[in-house]
Image: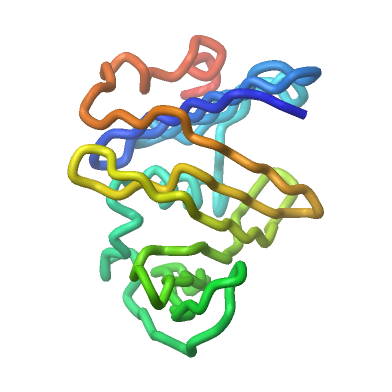
């Protein structure tokens, strides 16, 4: 299946992801700083609660890739391993909730090659592996332009065409009317 994805983020923790998939339609998920939500043609409008809400808050953290000690109080390099055909440092990151992610950093470039971790979903806890590659300079930052994620036997390949920073209107983060109706 093919589709498009748009990701909008703003500091400190605002995020909206819009995915359009052929045969499925548009799936939109977001976090407005307080409420996590999803609008999906299969499940309808839903609010995130419990562990799933905690996960959305973490994912919406604009600076989460910096691995802030407030979010990841324990970071430990475990080993040098082969990940996605590259020599990488395997780094364990323990989140404040006690769960753990693993980052892989390319020994040659120092860039993140990928991440393994768990995510809370409506279907329960799932494990996923993401590979990041084809880094390109965007402004002053290096940005992976190819992302491959494997979870529950499904592989998603995302090729980024454009990346912009500091160009999001605040109205993008307003929950849609169907979500506002659920917020009490």
Q: How many marks?
A: 0
Q: Residue at x 80, y 18 (%)?
A: 23
Percent of width and height locating residue 103: 47, 70
Q: Residue at x 41, y 46 (%)?
A: 57
Location of the N terminus (image quadrant): top right
User: With respect to residue 92, does 152 lie above or below?
Assistant: above
Percent of width and height locating residue 38: 58, 28
163 left or right of 119? left
Percent of width and height locating residue 32: 37, 30
Residue 16 visible in the picture: no
Q: Name the one closer to the observer, 152 or 97.
A: 152
User: With respect to residue 133, does 32 lie above or below?
Assistant: above
Instruction: Specify the quadrant of the image occupied by residue 3.
Output: top right
> In this view, which residue lies farthest toward the bottom?
79
Q: Residue at x 39, y 69 (%)?
A: 96
Q: Name the one closer to the observer, 168 or 44.
A: 168
Q: Residue at x 62, y 28 (%)?
A: 46
């Amino acid at each position: 299946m093919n589709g498009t994805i748009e990701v909008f983020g703003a500091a400190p923790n605002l995020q909206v992801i819009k995915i359009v998939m052929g045969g499925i339609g548009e799936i939109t998920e977001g976090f407005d700083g307080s409420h996590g939500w999803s609008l999906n043609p299969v499940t309808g409008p839903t609010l995130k609660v419990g562990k799933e809400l905690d996960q959305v808050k973490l994912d919406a953290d604009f600076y989460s890739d910096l691995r802030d000690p407030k979010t990841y109080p324990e970071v430990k390099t475990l080993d040098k391993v082969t990940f996605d055909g590259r020599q990488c440092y395997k780094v364990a990151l323990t989140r404040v909730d006690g769960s753990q992610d693993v980052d892989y950093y390319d020994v040659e470039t120092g860039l993140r090659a990928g991440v393994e971790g768990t995510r809370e979903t409506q279907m329960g806890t799932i494990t996923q592996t993401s590979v990041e590659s084809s880094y390109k300079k965007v402004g002053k930052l290096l940005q992976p332009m190819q992302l491959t994620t494997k979870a529950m036997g499904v592989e998603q390949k995302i090729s980024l065409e454009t990346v912009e920073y500091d160009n999001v209107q605040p109205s993008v983060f307003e929950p849609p009317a169907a979500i506002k109706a659920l917020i009490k």
